[in-house]
Image (spheres, grey):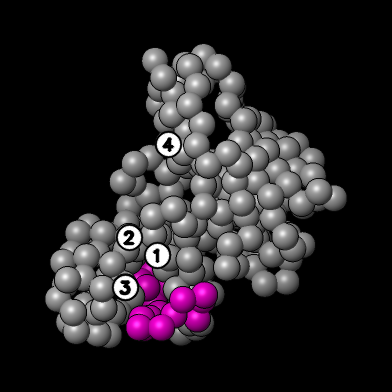
Amino acid sequence: SQQGEEDPQALSIQEGENATMNCSYKTSINNLQWYRQNSGRGLVHLILIRSNEREKHSGRLRVTLDTSKKSSSLLITASRAADTASYFCATEGDSNYQLIWGAGTKLIIKP
Amino acid sequence: NAGVTQTPKFQVLKTGQSMTLQCAQDMNHEYMSWYRQDPGMGLRLIHYSVGAGITDQGEVPNGYNVSRSTTEDFPLRLLSAAPSQTSVYFCASSYQQGANYGYTFGSGTRLTVV
């Protein structure tokens, strides 16, 4: 069963603009993770934010977590053509440690 | 290069055939798992293992078997392939469950059952 739901399902922006994707989930979590998947490839881990953290940065990536609203956002600043990919959020439960995945946001960066 | 290696990358099976998808990791990760990815859906967990000799079922285990005789290897067996098993299969590993560690994924096996 899917827990995470990404929004929007698809996003198309110009190179250089910022891209924001959102993820909502339903149950208590240990952490929330974001992954990138280029077309036809495996998933690549981008960033993990723990349930007691509110914001985390990694290079051009900024992730926020609001546990009261059960939601997270991923911001990619100064987008590049190479950022074109699908982005998935996954939550690790705080009792059952299995990852539960959303259906992903397809991001297209136009040159 | 350290990581998760999956073989084969592509496979076509006839209904009723069996096969094994191979997965190996060289990072000494305790946790390994198999997912399937279908269009428009997130990843769904098939089976997982928290260490050598220990396996358990995920969300969609029917029609699949796994074993974990070593830390490094976690093969997935399709017992009698069905068209509903047409999908992309990913193996993933992590240091340990609940350790706030990300997952490392293989490059996937694209399986078609005709």
Give the amino acid type for the residue marked by disc 2 in the picture: Val
User: Quick one: A78 or A44, which is closer to the camera?
Assistant: A78
Residue that numbered label 3 is attached to = B84
Q: Relative to residue A62, is residue B29 depicted above or below?
A: below
The quadrant in which residue B95 appears is bottom right
Residue that numbered label 1 is attached to = B36
Are the residues flagged by discs 2 and 1 in contact, CB closer than 8 Å? yes
Determine the secondary structure under disc 1: strand
Counting residues from the start of the chain, the first of labels 1 and 3 encountered is 1
Q: CA distance from mark 2 to mark 1?
A: 6 Å
Q: Is residue B54 visible?
A: yes
Residue that numbered label 2 is attached to = B88
Q: Residue furthest right?
A: A68
Q: CA distance from mark 4 to mark 3?
A: 26 Å
Q: What span is in magenta?
A: B57-74
Quadrant of the image containing the C terminus of chain B: bottom left
